[in-house]
Image (spheres, rainbow, N blue to C red):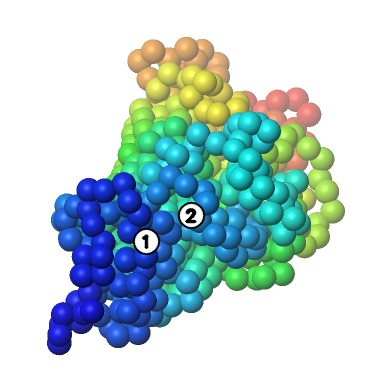
Amino acid sequence: MAVPDTGRYDIREFGAQSGSDDSNTEAIQTALDECAGTGGTVSVPPGTYVTGPLRVGDRTTLHLEAGATLRFVGDYEAFPTVKSRWEGWDQVGFHPCLLVDGADTVSITGRGTIDGNGEYWWQFYGEPESTLPDGLQDRLAEFEAQNDKQDDVSSFTHRPPLLQVFDAENVTVSGVTLRNSPFWNTHVVYSENVTITDVNIENPAGAPNGDGIDIDSSRYVRISDAYINAGDDAICIKSGKDAEGREVGEPASQITVTNCTVEAGHGGVVIGSEMSGDVRDVTVTNCTFTDTDRGIRIKTQRGRGGVVEDLRFDQIVMRRIACPFVINGYYFTPLDSDPEPIDEGTPLVRNVSFSNITARNVETAGFFAGLPERYFEGISFRDVRIDATRSLDATDLDPAMADGYEQTHGLFCKSIADISFRNVELRTPDSPALRVEETDDVTIDGLDVQRSADSSASSDEPALSLSNAERTRVSGCTAPSDGQFLRASGPKTDTISLAGNHGSLADSIEIDDGSDVRLDLD
């Protein structure tokens, strides 16, 4: 029923009607099926069209004109069971609202809106299973019978994502608004060559698991010029969970994020904690993050395994954020723990670069914690400005999601090998502004520590604290007019090299008893 010689499939020609509560699923799906493989376009004219879940096939463009809305029904019975990936494991669950599955050369375009009617699904989240409708209880029991990981993944996460691109290639999503997702908003999994550009992604703050964009074991993914206001993390990068994720072994790789604006949410760009299949070669540039709990966050834990490596974050501005920089090897586990044997479940983070970044009106400057049995490696800061003078409020963060750092303003590092700070400015109301523990190869070149006007720090508190930090090099720094620049402690603290500084830093260094520190002044 396409218009002759145009390849255009108007859903109204298949019986779709706007402005009615009646479902248009059959009409719209028929148009998509007729178009599949032709290289044509399924057109959604202005108006609101209620529909059940839809599937887009090969060589199809789904175009929503300005003023057009696809609104998905609030009825769990309309969503069949499908195989998918949920929270890092291959499982079954509800059919996504809009699904691109196993298809090649698909575009979703236009200035219209795709609305997941999330309010219907959110009402079930966190409710005792006995209070749910009988039919929904039956569906969840069906999922539990087919999934063997229900102890770790709550049944209530089995709500459909709004848009899922699954095992697909050459997919473009552009121009549209995607809002009110029942679960994650846009999920790209096991796919290749995917472009998401010039989209608006909108989930309210209370939307459970309301992530913006999740890139999951996919490669050659480009996200650009997007506005994201998410109920959870804005942009997530994942690659499977624990032993199964390592066995599947599909990394998330070759990913670029540029020119994106994030307003509110748990994190601007978040990697993990499902990263067992590796995450590598990620570049994030020219973005702004405002009113998010974290800015850039990498999270993992023992048992995950996998490697996160070769990440670049450049030209980013952050404002009103609890903690702008987080690399955490202790997600959901205690920070203070003894080393454990290294095995396939021991994760690693290495080669992460932060440059040309400004973070203002934040609470805590940063938190970096590797594992004592496997230090995270190669973390670098260059040309970074952090103004950590926002009032600390532990209630700002969900305790279940806390990274484990103390509620202090400074930047904390532990169990890191090879970390550098070049031309970094830290402004805090308390000291130390930079605290380094159990860390090797620390390079500090041009660190500028400023205390805010309302500083509560006493003059005998150092700007920099080293505890069991081997091989520290300090250059390009200025001796303070009063007070201490550095305090060193711990039996493992070895050599502190001071060269090319302004003034005599040696006069403002305190070495605690029990430390056998050698000062190299050349």
Of the image marks 1 and 2, the number of the one nearer the N terminus? 1
Q: Position of residue 95 (x, y in %)?
A: 51, 59
Distance (Cα) linking label 1 and label 2: 10 Å
323 relative position to 423: left or right:
right
Residue at (43, 59) in percent of width and height: 53
CB under 8 Å between discs 1 and 2:
yes
119 relative position to 506: left or right:
left
Q: Position of residue 501 (x, y in %)?
A: 44, 40
- Depth check, front residue: 481 or 467: 467
Q: Quadrant of the N terminus?
A: bottom left
- Disc 2 designates what residue? 78
- Residue 28 visible (yes or no): yes
- Disc 1 designates what residue? 25
Q: Position of residue 219 (x, y in %)?
A: 48, 71
Q: Quadrant of residue 384?
A: top left
Residue at (23, 57) in percent of width and height: 17
- Depth check, front residue: 343 or 139: 139
Q: Classify mark 2: helix, strand or loop.
A: helix
5 relative position to 117: left or right:
left
Could you tell me the amino acid type at mark 1?
Answer: Thr
Could you tell me the amino acid type at mark 2?
Answer: Ala
- Residue 278 visible (yes or no): no
